[in-house]
């Protein structure tokens, strides 16, 4: 299945990825190649098959734990990893003009 | 032979008998890493300070007769995907360069509690996306058997470090074969446990419905000990199973007489290198010689596994990797506006393969394509699981090659993503079905490159799988030429 540069740009915007012209061109070709390969799934008979999203312990299911409050990581340790923080919160570039 | 050249169980026995101390073992491990890592690049960083303190504490415990068990004092190393408090953790990506986690992954905490001595963090394909470790932002790892070749991936550093006897045991992760394939390509044992057997808390996520943590060692017994140490329920990982953890090593030598092992015809067809097939079939004969019954079976949906995997895994990855936005940790690009900051941060921080997979996953989940790609892939995934359920009504395990070829050359498949993906043809079905799998060495090709045999088991039946692997493993452990005995 072919995929054009405009589609690549659209998907890149959804994925929050700035692509160079070079990358747009390369990804259009490579994604087209992979999509052509996965096209084979269209021929599989999946009528009446339930999708499988969880291949874990079916007997145990996904039990929820008790909703018990407990301490989170200390704020200073978390903010220490931030590219920019003001001691209380993460800082980001301006959102509203 | 020096104790540090022994497989993990031999190292552990030497510690228990007092033939060697944890500190001497650590010295030997660090010396070998320093001698060989310039050529191999298995390690991204050492944790020498922490390791020395841990070895000293272990030696004291053993001297006081208070050893913590078989791993107490054993040098180990971690794929750089496991968070370790106070130690830089990058997942092989520039976007996480300089990230120092404020907590330990559950498996790291458990290894420390078992007395293991963590000597460093190991190279990997960026965010575990790859089959050759060439997608690491920090340069590729090389195969100890031939430095022009890849050790496989994504846990290539974990495999190469064990094969080169830098450490007797390591941890990796396996989303589509990232433990089993490199284990095969370097000639060691590597196991992906059942989905839910080991906690992923503190493990950097790639595709959450497939990711599983597992061990590498030169011997099956070593793998059994490492698995016993890391397995079990964790309230911090909702998918981890509450089932009790058996003593995997206890019944390892119980033999395989009477076990039925399925030979799926779809795994022995086109694309399988003749030398690999020959060695795997010899391994199967070795099992038959010990009383196993080999039965031909069919897993008819196997040919759809790679396509299914690359839709499910990339869709989940595109969602998991949305967190790298330059706000809370890792790299941030300079920009005046928020959207521009996100887009530039991710453009600068991610490598080509990661971008490619984020794009594919985003596309597969986007409006208008979801039903045709992601939803359909999940339905085919159900069929693949059903194939195994059916097979396991008449066999106890399944045997196959781990990888269709031996180690390929660096750069050989880098420009052809699809050819690289096809490396995983025999390993991805176990991830899609959530089943345990293990790769055991079963011989060498004409170039002297190792070959691996894969066993796939029933859910949570790691015990049987390890017992069969024990019966299949070689009696002798050949050293790669660059390791001097």
Image: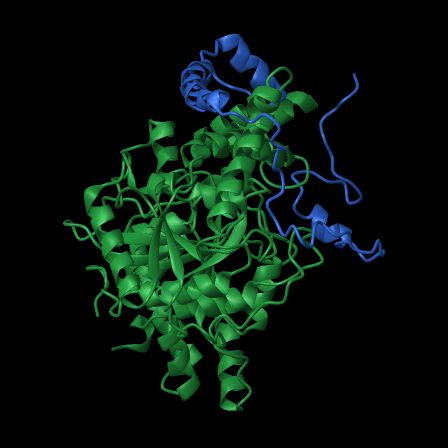
Residue B394 in the image: x percent, y percent? Answer: 45, 53
Residue at 55% x, 43% y is B210
Question: Does A58 sit left or right of B72 as displayed?
Answer: right
Determine whether A95 is above or below B76 in the image: above
Q: Is residue B166 above or below residue B276?
A: below
Residue B209 is situated, as x and y percent measured from the top left of the image, at 59, 42
**Residue B23 vertical position relative to residue B374 in the rendered view, above or below:** below
Question: Is residue B69 visible in this depiction of the protein?
Answer: yes
Q: Residue furthest left?
A: B446
Q: Residue at x 32, y 53 (%)?
A: B453
Tell which of A42 and B220 is nearer to you: A42
Q: From the image, which quarter does the N terminus of chain B lie in?
A: bottom left
- Judge from the rendering whether residue A16 lies leftward or rightward of residue A31; answer left or right: right
The residue closer to the viewer here, B16 or B482, is B16
Residue B485: name its quadrant. bottom left
Instruction: Work out which residue is located at the far bottom of the displayed protein and give it.
Output: B64
Residue depicted at x 40% and y 72%? B26
Q: How is the image coloured?
A: by chain
Which chain is rendered green in the image?
Answer: B
Chain A pictured colour:
blue
Does residue B344 show up? no
Counting from the top left corner in percent of width and height, residue B393 is at 50, 52
Where residue B328 appears, as percent x and y from the top left, is 68, 40
């Amino acid at each position: 299945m072919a995929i054009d540069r405009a589609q690549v740009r659209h998907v890149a915007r959804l994925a929050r990825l700035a692509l160079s012209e070079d990358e747009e061109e390369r990804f259009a070709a490579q994604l087209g190649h992979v999509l052509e390969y996965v096209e084979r799934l269209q021929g599989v008979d999946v009528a009446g098959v339930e999708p499988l999203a969880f291949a874990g312990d079916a007997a145990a299911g996904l039990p929820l734990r008790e909703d018990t409050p407990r301490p989170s990581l200390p704020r200073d340790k978390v903010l220490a990893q931030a590219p920019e923080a003001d001691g209380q919160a993460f800082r980001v570039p301006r959102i509203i003009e | 032979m020096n104790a540090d050249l022994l497989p993990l169980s031999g190292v552990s026995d030497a510690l228990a008998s007092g033939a060697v101390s944890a500190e001497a073992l650590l010295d030997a491990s660090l010396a070998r890493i320093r001698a060989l890592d310039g050529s191999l690049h298995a390690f991204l960083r050492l944790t020498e300070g922490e390791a020395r303190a841990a070895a000293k504490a272990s030696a004291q415990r053993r001297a006081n007769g208070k050893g913590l068990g078989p791993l107490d004092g054993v040098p180990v190393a971690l794929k750089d995907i496991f968070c370790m408090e106070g130690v830089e953790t990058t997942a092989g990506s520039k976007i996480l360069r300089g990230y120092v986690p404020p907590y330990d992954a559950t498996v790291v905490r458990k290894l420390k509690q078992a007395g293991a001595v963590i000597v460093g963090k190991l190279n990997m394909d960026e965010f575990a996306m790859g089959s050759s470790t060439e997608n690491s932002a920090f340069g590729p790892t090389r195969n100890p058997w031939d430095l022009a070749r890849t050790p496989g991936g994504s846990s290539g550093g974990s495999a190469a470090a064990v094969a080169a006897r830098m450490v007797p045991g390591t941890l990796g992760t396996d989303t589509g074969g990232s433990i089993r394939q490199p284990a095969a390509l370097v000639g060691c044992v590597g196991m992906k446990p059942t989905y839910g057997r080991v906690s992923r808390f503190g493990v950097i996520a790639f595709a959450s419905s497939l990711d599983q943590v597992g061990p590498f060692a030169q011997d099956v017994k070593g793998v059994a000990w490492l698995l016993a140490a890391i397995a079990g329920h964790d309230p911090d990982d909702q998918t981890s199973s509450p089932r009790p953890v058996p003593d995997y090593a206890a019944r390892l030598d119980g033999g395989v007489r009477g076990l039925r092992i399925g030979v799926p015809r779809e795994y022995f067809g086109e694309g399988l290198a003749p030398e690999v097939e020959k060695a795997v079939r010899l391994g199967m004969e070795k099992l038959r010689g010990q009383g196993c019954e080999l039965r031909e079976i069919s897993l008819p949906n196997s040919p759809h596994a790679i396509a299914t995997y690359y839709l499910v895994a990339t869709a989940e990855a595109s969602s998991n990797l949305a967190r790298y936005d330059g706000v809370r940790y890792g790299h941030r690009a300079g920009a005046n506006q928020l959207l521009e900051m996100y887009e530039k941060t991710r453009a600068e921080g991610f490598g080509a393969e990661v971008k490619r997979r984020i794009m594919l996953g985003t596309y597969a989940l986007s409006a208008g394509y979801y039903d045709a790609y992601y939803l359909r892939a999940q339905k085919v995934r159900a069929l693949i699981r059903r194939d195994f359920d059916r097979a396991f009504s008449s066999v106890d395990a399944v045997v196959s090659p781990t990888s269709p070829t031996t180690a390929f050359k660096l750069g050989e498949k880098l420009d052809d993503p699809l050819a690289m993906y096809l490396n995983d043809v025999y390993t991805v079905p176990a991830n899609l079905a959530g089943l345990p799998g293990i790769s055991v060495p079963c011989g060498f090709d004409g170039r002297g490159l190792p070959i691996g045999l894969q066993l796939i088991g029933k859910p949570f039946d790691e015990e049987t799988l390890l017992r069969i692997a024990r019966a299949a493993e070689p009696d002798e452990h050949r050293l790669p030429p660059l390791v001097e005995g």
